[in-house]
Amino acid sequence: MDDFKTHIHSNGLPTEAAAFNKASLRMGSIKSRILEELEEAGESGLTPDEFVFKHGGLINTIRRRFTDLWKDGRIKHHPTLLTRKNGAGNDCVTWVLGRDLNMAPRVAKGRWIGLTDEEAFQICVDCGCLSEDWLTFLDAIEAKLKEKNL
């Protein structure tokens, strides 16, 4: 699941967090249903529009779930780059189960690993700056990096 912090405001209300959590459950079930439909479709594949026609939902929401599954490496474009027309006559990408070979794996954010006291001290030694001010400065830099990367 995507990181919680990328979907709500940093000073979000508790109701906003609750709504995100409720929607997250729905997103997971949509993805599961898409995967089931793709398995059933086999080599003929499935377009987001076909999924919406069969199950309902908002097309933009469903397209986003297909994209999420693609980014996670669970589905890929049809090997022949097959498209099918939707109700408006536009070409739609057909998806099948599997991973695109040319797609780099998605890198998950790891947990923060800060400097040890020994590493911070060694940096100060290497810079020739052993005053207390430099240790405070290193701590402030590390705190800001941690804030930006969590």
Image (cartoon, rainbow, N blue to C red):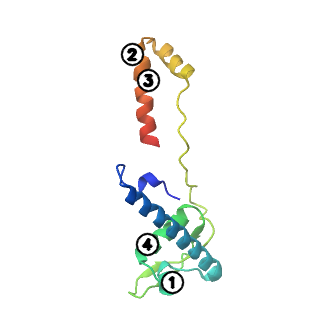
Amino acid type, label 2: Asp
Q: Check disc 1 and report its element: helix, strand or loop.
A: helix
Circle 1 is placed at which residue position? 55
Residue 94 x/y as whole percent: 53, 78
In the image, is residue 9 above or below residue 136? below
Using the numbered discs, state the Cα–Cα distance from disc 1 to disc 3 in whole angstroms: 55 Å
Can you see residue 57? yes
Circle 2 is placed at which residue position? 133
Q: Check disc 2 and report its element: helix, strand or loop.
A: helix
Using the numbered discs, state the Cα–Cα distance from disc 2 to disc 3 in whole angstroms: 9 Å
Using the numbered discs, state the Cα–Cα distance from disc 1 to disc 2 in whole angstroms: 62 Å
Q: Are marks 1 and 2 in contact (CB under 8 Å)?
A: no
Looking at the image, residue 140 sits to the left or right of residue 32; the answer is left
Q: Are marks 4 and 3 in contact (CB under 8 Å)?
A: no
Earlier along the polypeptide chain: callout 2 or callout 4? 4
Amino acid type, label 1: His
Amino acid type, label 4: Thr
Residue lying farthest to the front in this orientation: 14
Circle 4 is placed at which residue position? 61
Using the numbered discs, state the Cα–Cα distance from disc 4 to disc 3 in whole angstroms: 44 Å
Residue 81 x/y as whole percent: 54, 75
Earlier along the polypeptide chain: callout 1 or callout 4? 1
Amino acid type, label 3: Leu
Residue 66 x/y as whole percent: 51, 70
Q: Are marks 1 and 4 in contact (CB under 8 Å)?
A: no
